Structure formats: structure tokens, C-alpha cells
Image (cartoon, rainbow, N blue to C red):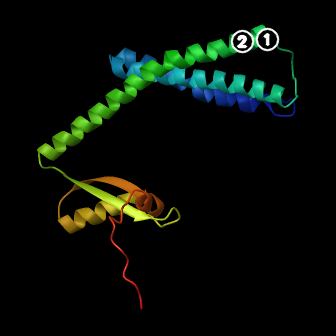
Amino acid sequence: MRPRVSDTITGVAIAVALVPPPVAAGIALGEGFRTQARGALLLYGTNLGAIVFGTVATVLALRLLGERPFELSRRRVTKAATIVVVLGLALGVPLAGSFTDAVGVAQSERDRRVRDGEVTLVSVVLLGRNDSYIPALAALDDGVADVLGRPVELGIRLVGVADQVASGGSRGRRRPRAD
């Protein structure tokens, strides 16, 4: 959109986003891995959709700012917006399905590990202000495992002090007065 920015940067970015997924899909299909090929093609579609969406959003934003690098008829803008919406819906359904499948597999694996005694589930609630220090989660996981003497999988919930007070977290207890 801007002549002073090198076209090479855009070309390389698009090539990096669009070339590897179909190549991976071809290799996966050649080896008989249909699920992996489907995932690679879904990534290709997602990257392509993001590039189209970004291009349309950029052109529209520039037009709103008063820059008109080229003329667009209302018909072309409507057509581009329609393509973005259709592409978004066409990708959104399989992406949602893929995400749901991945969550289901992860939950099944966690449940199996708990059932087989490989790991213990531990729920942790961390209270603090928004600017509170939060330890690295891997360190927290390792620390709890060391204390319990067995592998654990943490379920962590971060709760801000304001959230705690607003939800009645003090349960009506009064703070002791310092007289």
C-alpha cells in the first residue's frame, strides 16, 4: 500500500505463511497420515484467510484515514468483505472442531494418567493484586510435586484481590483492629 516499503518483505512473509503447510500436507498424505494432512491444510487456509482479512482491513483503514492508494467501488468493497466473512465461516467451523477434538484428547489423556496413578491433580488458587508477582508455572508445578513426593498436574486459577472482595470472598469476617 505504501511505495516506500519494500515489496520483498510482504512477499517473503506471505511465502513463509503459505508454502510450508501444503508441503507438509503433501508429505503427510504421501505417508498416509490423513489427520496431519488435514491439520496442515487447515493451517494453510487459516494463514490465507488471515492474509486476506489483513489486506482488506488495511485497505479499509487507509480509506477511513483519507488515503486512497487506488480507487475502490462500493461493489468491490462489498465483494471483498463478503469473501472475508465466507472464508471466516468456512475456516471457523473446522477450526472449532479441531480445537474441540484437541481439548477432548488432552482431557482423556489427563484422565487416563490420573486413573493409572501416574499423576495427581492439584487445584491451586493464587490470590493477589493485578501487579502481584506470579511465579513461573513450571516452578510452581515442580515445587508442589516435590512437597507431595509424586508427579502432579496443576489446575491453576488466578484471582485478583478486587475479584475476591467483589465476590464476597471474605465471607463476612472482619479484620482484627490494631488498637
The crowd level at tag 2 (other Cα within 10 Å; few <14, some 14-19, many 20+) is: few
Mark count: 2
The residue shown at (79%, 11%) is 74
Tell whether 90 sits left or right of 155: right
The C terminus sits in image quarter: bottom left
Q: Which amino acid does label 1 sit on?
A: Arg
Q: Nearer the viewer, residue 86 or 32?
A: 86
What percent of the width, then of the height, locates residue 29?
38, 15
The residue shown at (27%, 55%) is 123
Q: Which mark is on residue 78?
A: 2
Which residue is farthest top?
75
The residue shown at (40%, 56%) is 167
Q: What residue type is labelled 2?
A: Thr
The crowd level at tag 1 (other Cα within 10 Å; few <14, some 14-19, many 20+) is: few
User: Pointers 2 and 1 in contact (CB under 8 A)?
Assistant: yes
Q: Distance between the residues labelled 2 and 1?
A: 6 Å
Q: What element carries label 1?
A: helix
What percent of the width, then of the height, locates residue 36?
37, 23
The N terminus sits in image quarter: top right
Q: Which mark is on residue 74?
A: 1
Q: Is mark 2 on a helix, strand or loop?
A: helix
What percent of the width, then of the height, locates residue 103?
32, 34
Q: Which mark is on residue 162?
A: none
Q: Can see residue 23? A: no
Tell me where residue 14 sits by quadrant: top right
Vertical placement of residue 32 versus 151, above or below: above
